[in-house]
Amino acid sequence: MTAEAPRICCLDLDTFFVSVERLLDPSLLGKPVIVGGQPGTRGVVTACSYEVRALGVRSGMSLTEAAKLAPHAIYLSGRDREYGKYSEQVVAIAQRYSPLVRMASIDELYMDFRGCERLFQRPGDHDADATILRVVHALTDCIAAEVGLPASAGIATSKSVAKIACGLAKPRGVLLVRAGQEAHTLAPLPVRKLPGIGPVTEQRIVALGITTLGELATSPVRVLERAFGPHAASMRARALGHGDAELSRDRPAFHEHDMEGESLGSISNERTFHEDVRELRVVESMLCALCERVCWRARRRGVEARTITLKLRYADFDTITRSRTVTPSASERELLPLLKRLYRDARQRSLAIRLLGVALSNLVLAEQLPLFPRDGQVRANVDELRERYGFDAVRLGTGLRVPRDDDEEGDPAG
């Protein structure tokens, strides 16, 4: 690999929320821990320790199901502010090692080491890969020593392969995939290892007789179209190890308000009802509260969304989503009516509803507001009050009926 070849590092904080809880309470070390809420509540597992993963508990699993598998585990509700503080410390350390750092979520980031080899070379170093491998080991050691958190890392020529390598390195490991070895490294792995392939897509692929990434990489595109549709060719290329070789440079490397569990490309909130609901007024109140929060978070980050998505889960766990492309916006006044229309279009069954979610995606940097925008000025004043006194200091009346403790921000973290 030449010094100018792509060299992307994916760094993931192992069992991040659990690890932070153990720093705050050392008595939890070595014990089975589940973060997300108490048994019997209707939330989901946000994170779990390796002790309970061995029992089958996974992030995103309902707490009810987790309690059946691990009834004697220690269940914690979590503390978002503390997690953000620790994540910020990790980002600050990462920025010492690479000029380009991008957060993917509160516990995962990407770094670009392209052209950095000479900065870290020692006398006698002739292998650029070995140099970067040594540097990333030093980075994870530094995070462990200064912050107290375990981390794993993968290094490769693309983001997707780096992410896979990071997963293979867990826990507390570092794995480098040399240029030209991507397809060989991925070939024996199950198809689910490829980012973007979830349980439903995996079932469709396995139904075609394809179980490994090597088989996926060598399958005809016309066959793969049955599972991926128009994305068949690109998914096959990714199974060969091809993918994004650069990190986006149009966003700041880090922003103090990025620490809320969402990826840089989306902002989401979802809530599970304590009891399944049918009443339209309760649903609309929830939609209002969710829309209000994601718009607030978008404005804090200085971004607007081109796509808004509604997630609806029925009492029987059947889940559907509906999306709409919009003029870039971070205004609940503009987006809430669209959400209500998406809900009406999506509500095809009379069955009660278990969960609602709202996501903003295809984010772009917000344009500067006009000099005297009435609606914009109101939002600015509201946001200033929230910065001082917390989000719930000012709320839309429609969303006030939604309790605060049901909130589940972003995607579950492992």
Image (cartoon, grey):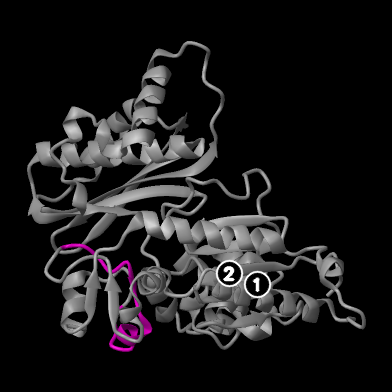
**Could you tell whether 282 is left or right of 45 in the image?**
left
Residue at screen point 33% across, 89% down: 54
Measuring from the top left, give residue 108's x and y in whole percent. Answer: 52, 64
Question: Circle 2 sits in a helix, a strand or a loop, which is it?
Answer: strand
Q: Residue drawn 21% across and 56% down?
A: 313
Q: Position of residue 343 (x, y in %)?
A: 23, 41
Quadrant of the rendered image containing residue 320:
bottom left
Please state, as top left, top right, bottom left or bottom right, where the N terminus lies in the image: bottom right
Q: Residue at x 62, y 73 (%)?
A: 142
Mark 2 and 1 residues: CB-CB less than 8 Å, in contact? yes
Residue type at numbered disc 1: Leu
Magenta-highlighted stretch: main secondary structure?
A: loop
Q: Position of residue 9 (x, y in %)?
A: 65, 68
Range of magenta residues: 42-57
Between disc 2 and disc 1, the foreground one is: 1
Is 20 on the left-hand or right-hand side of 124? left
Using residue 321 as the reference point, say whether residue 4 is left or right of it. Answer: right
Is residue 230 among the parts visible in the rendering? no
Q: Nearer the viewer, residue 172 or 271?
A: 172
186 w.r.t. 354: above or below: below
Q: Let me know if residue 308 appears in the view.
A: yes
Report the front residue among 199 and 266: 266
Which residue sits at x=45%, y=84%? 209
Magenta-colored stretch includes residue 364 = no
Identify the mark at residue 139; answer none if there is no mark.
1
* Residue position for label 2: 11
Image coords of residue 274 (percent x, y)? 11, 56
Which amino acid, by three-letter code, is at mark 2?
Leu
- Quadrant of the rendering where the C terminus is positioned: bottom left
Answer with mark 2 or mark 1, whichever residue precedes in sequence.
2
